[in-house]
Amino acid sequence: MTLSYLHIVGNLSFGLTALSFLMRDILLLRIFATVSSLLGVAYNYLIPEGPLWLVIFWLSVFASINLVRIIMLFLENRGIKFSEEEQELYDTVFKSFAPVEFMKLIRVAEWRMSAEGEYLAVEDEPLDSLKLIYNGDAVVEKHDLEIAQLHDGRFVGEVSYLQGTKNATATVRTVRTTRYLSWQKEELRKLLKRNPTMDMAMNTLVQHDIIDKLAYTGDDL
């Protein structure tokens, strides 16, 4: 038996809600959630047992909240201008962040330059920052053995950051002049605590970085 148009609308409403949970981009998430709510309103108004006004009321509230947030996101993002370096980072690494979220992240970071042979982290020694290589190369060593190589777009100190530990879990040494971003862990955590969607996006980004490294090395960084 084929689904009626009404059943299709109802299933599409729930389907879009499920898809919204998969969206990393907060704007897309809210757009999907808004369309889902509006389809839900139509479904609950047109069903033979309806209209179900209680459900319609709350779905309308959810749609209104998301519409307001979408408008605010457009207004916030409209005035944001990135430098060439920031734009490249946003397009390649931080595309899961809304532009205004990425700008907040950049504001608490420091651009730094490291010469060849300098250490970005030393195994079992305190590491108070999370770093991201923008342009350069480094090697990762554990127990004086090289286990990985890091290039553009890779984090340094991501394991201790996620685990909330003080010391670095590996040594990272540059093999050529390297430009990178550095976030003080405590300052970064304070920012992310105030912005839950940023916190979720950052943790996902760092976790994926760890998974990619483990897939490459077959070892625990």
Image (cartoon, rainbow, N blue to C red):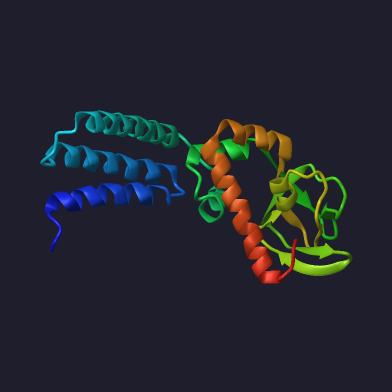
Lateral position of residue 93 relative to residue 167, left or right: left
Q: Where is residue 115 in the image (x, y as percent from the top left)?
A: 81, 55
Residue 83 visible within the image: no
Q: Which residue shows up at 13% across the image and 62% down it? A: 2
The answer to whether any part of residue 164 appears in the image is: yes
Examine the image and state in which quarter residue 41 appears.
Answer: top left
Q: 151 and 112: which one is in front?
A: 151
Residue at 19% x, 33% y: name it: 52
Image quadrant for the C terminus?
bottom right
The residue lying furthest to the left in this view is: 48
Answer left or right for 62 relative to 121. left
User: Whole-percent x and y of residue 82?
Assistant: 53, 42
Count all numbered tags in the image, as a single digit: 0
- For the N terminus, the image quarter is bottom left
- For image coordinates 82% across by 69% down, the residue present is 146
> Is residue 146 positioned above or below 66 on the image?
below
In-image side of 139 versus 191 (left or right): right
Tell which of 99 and 156 is nearer to you: 156
Find residue 99 and report its horizontal and vertical position in percent: 49, 41
167 in relation to 44, above or below? below
